[in-house]
Image: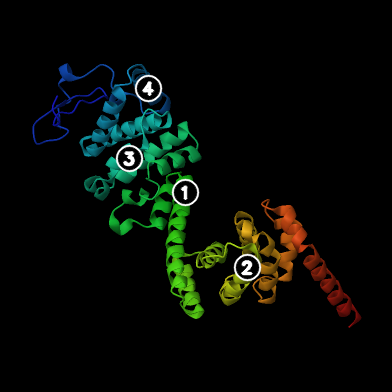
């Protein structure tokens, strides 16, 4: 069989002609070229279609050499979805979803759905919804999204829609209305991660060029507004970029002094984006993790926190909450011990302030 010919594993046959990849459909009335068992003539319910999927699954397990050929044929079938009726498309989508769920097919077959003609006519999105429903009936949402990531399709889902509709909001509404809110939420998270990576890259560039802090603040605020990013998502990025902007001294006795000088310069920037209690806690956790992961900073943790306290980056409430319950496991005993005297001082100062208030 040459590359222009197309065998169909669903029971219904095609006659083939050169220059017509995929061939053309035969007349439905020609029963001599039809098999008795065909997915397209089966009942449109999950259990029935699953029985057909099990046949393919068992065959491919027994004859491994069929695996790649089957994958290639399914990709071709998806390319020519317009040749099928809506009912046939639904059954093929269900079969594909089940086969994806049981591992007979890889997620890469979905790339066929990004064909312009399928996208423009709305076939790609409609087919994808039915496919994902069947897939999720076989596997949980985490398994589905994990497969999409491995196939590098997690950032391409918007391509199921025409260019003028490739927005997260449109995707979310379409898939949520179809009962696939898990995929809507997944796409939002993926888009947010992509946005954060771009923001971090740009921030790193601006800090390396030593842009004025006012300009950096203005840029970050604009990006937050444009991408609907919360302050809690930005504070960690800022910390990472600030710490990556310097080549640190390898000597422990010198790195603390270098770090304090550097962080004092950028404390006003961090202060702008740590106006909420949760943002402060995230920053404290980031500092803790950084000092643990970079051994030369182990003894600098307390000094950094005190600097941020004096520079109004961190509040007394945030530091006490971190100390009591919000710290992370990394280096917990070392850093709590470092902070013990300062925390006691904060608590005493708080008690004195309260007693003065009562006397007044």
Asked which secondary structure carries label 3, the reply is helix
Which residue: 52% across, 67% down? 246
Q: How is the image coloured?
A: rainbow
Q: Residue at x 13, y 31 (%)?
A: 4
Residue 32 higher or lower than 358, as above or below: above
Percent position of residue 269, x then y: 56, 74
Residue at numbered disc 2: 254
Percent position (x, y) of residue 243?
A: 54, 65
Mark 4: give few (<14), some (14-19) or many (20+) Cα within 10 Å: some
Q: Which residue is label 3 attached to?
A: 110
Q: CA separation, marks 2 and 1?
A: 44 Å
Q: Earlier in the sequence, mark 1 or mark 4?
A: 4
Q: Position of residue 174 (x, y in %)?
A: 39, 50
Of pointers 3 and 1, the one earlier in the residue sequence: 3
Image x and y of residue 170, in percent? 38, 55
Which SS class for mark 2?
helix
Query: Which of label 3 and label 2 is nearer to you?
Result: 2
| Residue wearing tag 1 | 186
């Amino acid at each position: 069989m040459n590359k222009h010919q197309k065998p169909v594993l669903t029971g219904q046959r095609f006659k083939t002609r050169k220059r017509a990849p995929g061939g053309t459909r035969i007349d439905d009335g020609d029963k001599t070229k039809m098999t008795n068992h065909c997915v397209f003539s089966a009942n449109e319910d999950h259990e029935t279609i699953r029985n057909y999927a099990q046949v393919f699954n068992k065959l491919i397990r027994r004859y491994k050499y069929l695996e790649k050929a089957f994958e290639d044929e399914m990709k071709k079938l998806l390319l020519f979805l317009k040749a099928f009726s809506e009912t046939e498309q639904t059954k093929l989508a269900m079969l594909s979803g089940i086969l994806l769920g049981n591992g007979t097919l890889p997620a890469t077959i979905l790339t066929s759905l990004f064909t312009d003609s399928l996208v423009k006519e709305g076939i790609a999105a409609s087919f994808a919804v039915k496919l994902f429903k069947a897939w999720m009936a076989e596997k949980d949402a985490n398994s589905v999204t994990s497969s999409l990531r491995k196939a590098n399709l997690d950032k391409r889902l918007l391509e199921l829609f025409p260019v003028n509709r490739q927005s997260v909001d449109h995707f979310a509404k379409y898939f949520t209305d179809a009962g696939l809110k898990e995929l809507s939420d997944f796409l939002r998270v993926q888009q947010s991660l992509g946005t954060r990576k771009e923001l971090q890259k740009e921030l790193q560039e601006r800090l390396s060029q030593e842009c004025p802090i006012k300009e950096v603040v203005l840029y970050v605020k604009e990006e937050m507004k444009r991408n609907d990013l919360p302050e809690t998502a930005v504070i960690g990025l800022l910390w990472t970029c600030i710490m990556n902007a310097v080549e640190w001294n390898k000597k422990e006795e010198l790195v603390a002094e270098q770090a304090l000088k550097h962080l004092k310069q950028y404390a006003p920037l961090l202060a702008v984006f740590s106006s909420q209690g949760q943002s402060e806690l995230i920053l404290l956790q980031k500092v803790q993790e950084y000092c643990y992961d970079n051994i030369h900073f182990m003894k600098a943790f307390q000094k950094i926190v005190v600097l941020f306290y004096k520079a109004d980056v961190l509040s007394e409430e945030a530091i006490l909450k971190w100390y009591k319950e919000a710290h992370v496991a990394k280096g917990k005993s070392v850093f709590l011990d470092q902070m013990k005297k300062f925390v006691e001082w904060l608590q005493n100062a708080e008690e004195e302030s309260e007693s003065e208030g009562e006397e007044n």
